[in-house]
Amino acid sequence: MKQDSESIQKMMIILSKGTLENVYAAFVLANGARMEGINADVFFTFFGLEAIHKKKLEHLHVATVGNPAMHIPTMIGGLPGMEALATSMMKKEMEKIDMPDILEFLEILTASGVKLWACKLAMDMFHYKKEDLYEGVEDIITVGDFYNKSQGPGTHILFI
């Protein structure tokens, strides 16, 4: 990869949502960065923490309410079973293209050098402990720590 003053050197991805589609978007972008030789960190905050919570990461769902891309009325999306149906359908489509499940994707990311950080404020708010998290999480850090890690030329911050 070309290294100059305008090239991307590091992607700092903030994941604030725990829906299946948002988690995969963050993971695909982080993985793609590493494949291009770009450093990548993911900062999990608020409901994004569910993607690294051991008891929750395998139970993420597709958002059917308030998601205009679903192309279904909100009232229909809120019916019992719709979220489970949409999630099942999306997981089947992802299996067809060999998309790894969340746990396997976390393993791929950490093996490739992606740094995973949990937000201290959100951890405190949800009463989570470090032992609740996927083992590959580097640490629990503050927003200030995150900004310090984001310093340097060629760093881009992406909020999902």
Image: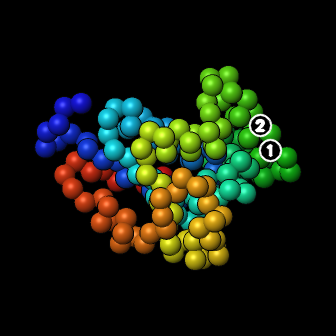
Query: Would you say the residues marked 1 and 2 are in contact, meaning their CB atoms lie under 8 Å apart?
Result: yes
Three-letter amino acid code of the residue under disc 2: Ser
Residue drawn at (35%, 72%) of the image:
144
Q: Which residue is mark 2?
A: 88
Residue drawn at (30%, 59%) of the image:
150
Q: Position of residue 142 (x, y in %)?
A: 43, 72
Horizontal side, residue 139 vs residue 33: left or right: right
Check disc 2 and report its element: helix, strand or loop: helix
Q: Position of residue 137 (x, y in %)?
A: 52, 57
Q: Which residue is mark 1?
A: 84
Check disc 1 and report its element: helix, strand or loop: helix
Instruction: Using the rendered image of the protein, determine whether residue 115 is visible from the camera's viewpoint.
Output: yes
Residue drawn at (58%, 77%) of the image:
124
Instruction: Using the rendered image of the protein, determine whether residue 69 is visible from the camera's viewpoint.
Output: no
Q: Residues within 10 Å of mark 2 (few under 14, many from 20)?
A: some
Residue drawn at (43%, 46%) of the image:
114
Q: Is residue 155 above or below residue 91?
A: below
Q: Residues within 10 Å of mark 1 (few under 14, many from 20)?
A: some
In this figure, what is the number of numbered marks? 2
Horizontal side, residue 74 vs residue 50: left or right: right
Q: Is residue 132 above or below residue 88?
A: below
Q: Of the numbered discs in the image, which one, if any, rests on residue 52?
A: none
Q: Position of residue 108 (x, y in %)?
A: 53, 38
Q: Quadrant of the N terminus?
A: top left
